[in-house]
Structure formats: C-alpha cells, structure tokens
Image: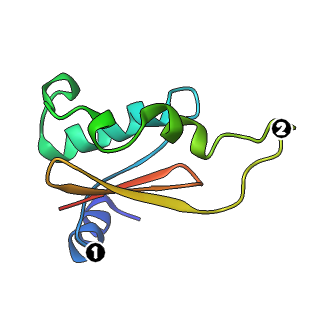
C-alpha cells in the first residue's frame, strides 16, 4: 500500500500515529515513542509520565508470553495520554488517535 493511501486511510479513521511494537523493547517504550511522534515531540518532552495513566510494568507484561512460553490470547487495552487515545493490541500494533 502506498504511503499516501496509508496516510489518507489513517486520517479517515482518525489515527494520528500508528506503530508496530518491536518485542526487543518494552511495550511501554513503544507507546511513549508513538505518542511522542503524534505530538511531534521528543519522548523526553512529553511531560506527563506514562505511570500517571497506566502502570508501565503491567503494560509491558500484559501481552507477554505465558510462563510456559505460549502466547496470550487476543485483546487490547485503551487509555489516554496527553490529548490522545492510545490503543495497544495483543499483536503489537499501537494506535494513537486525537
């Protein structure tokens, strides 16, 4: 899909920023990076700590593999950070909407 089509699709769906979570980094870091990109800020400049909205450790563990190594089921979590609605899906997709 071309970049312009993706941008238009995102604008139609109200998506300000989207990212795919790289499992080599904490999920909380991916969320901060996606919100910072949406707000056109450096992640250190966000100002509102993530833990004021959601426990970063709980978020990092929410979709991690079970103790036996099996993946967890599907699902998502939604919360607000700055003026954005953040949706994190179990497949690693992070969506930021205004």
Residue lying at the far bottom of the rendered structure: 12
Foreground pick, 3 / 11 = 11
Mark found first going from the N terminus, 1 or 2? 1
Q: What percent of the width, then of the height, locates residue 87?
A: 39, 58
> Are the two marked residues, 1 and 2, in contact with CB atoms closer than 8 angstroms?
no
Q: What percent of the width, then of the height, locates residue 24?
A: 57, 26
Residue identified by numbered label 2? 69
- Work out which quarter of the rendered image holds the N terminus and state it: bottom left
Residue 30 as seen in the image, left or right of residue 41: right
Residue lying at the far top of the rendered structure: 44
Q: Residues within 10 Å of mark 2 (few under 14, many from 20)?
A: few
Q: Is residue 92 above or below residue 44?
A: below
* Residue at (52, 60) in percent of width and height: 76
Residue 5 as seen in the image, left or right of residue 78: left
Q: Is residue 40 above or below residue 77?
A: above
1 vs 2, front mark? 2
* Residue at (37, 43) in percent of width and height: 54
Q: Which mark is residue 33?
A: none
Q: Secondary structure at mark 2?
A: loop
Q: Is residue 4 above or below residue 59?
A: below
* Residue at (21, 70) in percent of width and height: 11
How many numbered marks appear? 2
Residue 32 as seen in the image, left or right of residue 71: left
- Work out which quarter of the rendered image holds the C terminus and state it: bottom left
Residue 4 as seen in the image, left or right of residue 30: left
Distance CA(mark 1)–CA(mark 2): 35 Å
Q: Secondary structure at mark 1?
A: loop
Foreground pick, 4 / 67 = 67
Q: What percent of the width, then of the height, locates residue 21?
A: 49, 41
Q: What percent of the width, then of the height, locates residue 68?
A: 87, 38
Residue identified by numbered label 1? 13
């Amino acid at each position: 899909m071309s970049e312009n089509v993706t941008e238009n699709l995102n604008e139609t769906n109200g998506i300000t920023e989207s990212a795919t979570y790289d499992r080599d980094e904490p999920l909380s870091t991916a969320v901060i990076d996606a919100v910072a990109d949406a707000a056109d800020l450096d992640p250190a400049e966000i100002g509102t700590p993530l833990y004021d909205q959601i426990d970063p450790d709980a978020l990092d563990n929410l979709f991690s593999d079970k103790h036996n190594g099996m993946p967890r089921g599907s699902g998502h979590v939604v919360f607000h950070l700055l003026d954005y609605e953040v949706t994190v899906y179990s497949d690693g997709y992070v969506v930021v909407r205004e």
